[in-house]
Amino acid sequence: MSQFLLEPHPSPTAPAQRAALLEAPSFGTVFTDHMAAIDWTAGGAGWHRHRVIPYGPIELMPSAGVLHYAQEVFEGLKAYRWPDGSIRLFRPAANAERLARSARRLALPELSPEDFIASLEALIEVDLAWVPSKPGTSLYLRPFMFAAEPFIGVRASHQVSYYVIASPVGAYFKSGAAPVSIWVDRVYHRAGPGGTGAAKCGGNYAASLVSQEAAYDHGCEQVLFLDAATSTHLEELGGMNVVVVMADGAVVTPPTSGTILEGVTRSSLLQLVRDRGREVVERPVVLADLLDGIRSGAVAEVFACGTAAVVTPVGRLAGDGFDQVIGDGAPGELTMSLADELTGIQYGRREDKHGWAYRVA
Ligand SMILES: *Cc1c(COP(=O)(O)O)cnc(C)c1O
């Protein structure tokens, strides 16, 4: 395993100030004192200069490829403080593999799972005191990789930078587990067949932001995208997967067939559903059928899932020509029970039958 050289922050946050910041962290606004970094150069050198350095501006030429052609991928996972004081990541190997898949799609070099996990461990070791301990809080880790070569010709970059930054977080949505309203976009798509929908890349998010704005304009918190080929079935939200719970107990979710992101939260929740002996069906979900099912009562619950917010109940689905409350608009029973089970495993309150927790400290 590569050694990360440490350049300590010359004036780290004072303990009292850090404690104040950890009191009620909001999502993604406060960052720890350090960041991890690794460089990559084409032609033999590969990944090198593994280091942990003070959190601060990244020096980049205005011609750096990422600023022009968005050659960038990222990850998102959390470190949890357990009741025994240990610090655990949740299924980091899944994030390592996904980063490698995303990198391949964006013509970026693959970082080995060993380097990926070592970069998280190296940063957490230095900024251990930043892992918050209040219920529902965690340290959100954001690894990302981008084209750093100062060259505006169009080709894969010969210089690439990888960083990990960390941010203490509380609940993602200010409203906590309150159900969200979702706007179904009939104008734009986030990804198409053969595109980058299955890669976790900034470009997908850039393409989703006008739709997110439209959602706000219609009084909704989140946007749901339909498939680009037919505009008839559900894909996912801007940054979360979507799951439907039928009244007969089956759990239905769109398949990961290339245009949606394979969420670690999604796959973990589906496993927990199977563990309960319930049927999981990965198949296209037709919007018209979903709306019919909500009206008839055949659909009991809808929720969204992703690392940041974990499980988010959906209380209402709106779009051009429809505005439909789901059930009585309150969080569904299975939704809340799965949220409780998954967060229980993540925070060490429940047995980790699948060995998902990975101890880093
Ligand atoms: C990250 C992400 C998700 C959720 O993935 P998790 O691994 O569960 O955090 C879902 N959709 C998109 C578009 C994403 O970028």
Image (tube, grey):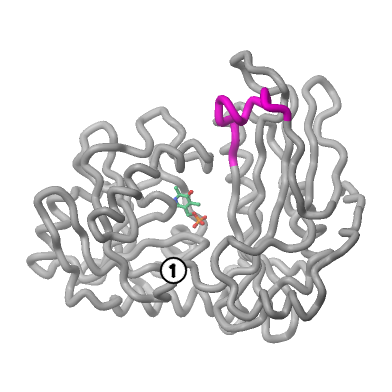
Q: Which amino acid type corresponds to the residue marked 1 in the rendered image? A: Phe
**In this view, 336 is above or below 240:** below
Residue 3 rendering spot, x and y as whole percentages: 90, 50
> From the image, which quarter does the C terminus lie in?
bottom right
Q: Is residue 66 magenta?
A: yes
Residue 233 rendering spot, x and y as whole percentages: 23, 45
**In this view, 111 is above or below 19:** above
* Residue 352 visible in the current orientation: no
Q: Residue at x 80, y 78 (%)?
A: 15
Ligand 1 within 8 Å of the CB at mark 1: no
In this view of the protein, which residue sits in the foreground, 338 or 206? 206
Q: Which residue is drawn at 58% across and 61% down?
A: 28
How many other residues sit within 10 Å of disc 1, few (<14), some (14-19) or many (≥20)?
A: some
In this view of the protein, which residue sits in the foreground, 269 or 145? 145
- The part of the chain drawn in magenta is 61-73
- What residue is shown with label 1? 173
Residue 50 rendering spot, x and y as whole percentages: 85, 44
User: Left of 140 or right of it: where is 4?
Assistant: right
In this view of the protein, which residue sits in the foreground, 348 or 59? 59
User: Left of 116 or right of it: where is 327?
Assistant: left
Furthest residue to the top? 153
Q: Which residue is drawn at 39% across and 69% down?
A: 273
Q: Which residue is drawn at 30% across and 79% down?
A: 333
Residue 140 rendering spot, x and y as whole percentages: 62, 63
Q: How many dots with numbers?
A: 1
Q: Is residue 277 magenta?
A: no
- Mark 1 residue element: loop
User: Left of 258 or right of it: where is 217?
Assistant: left
* Residue 293 visible in the current orientation: yes
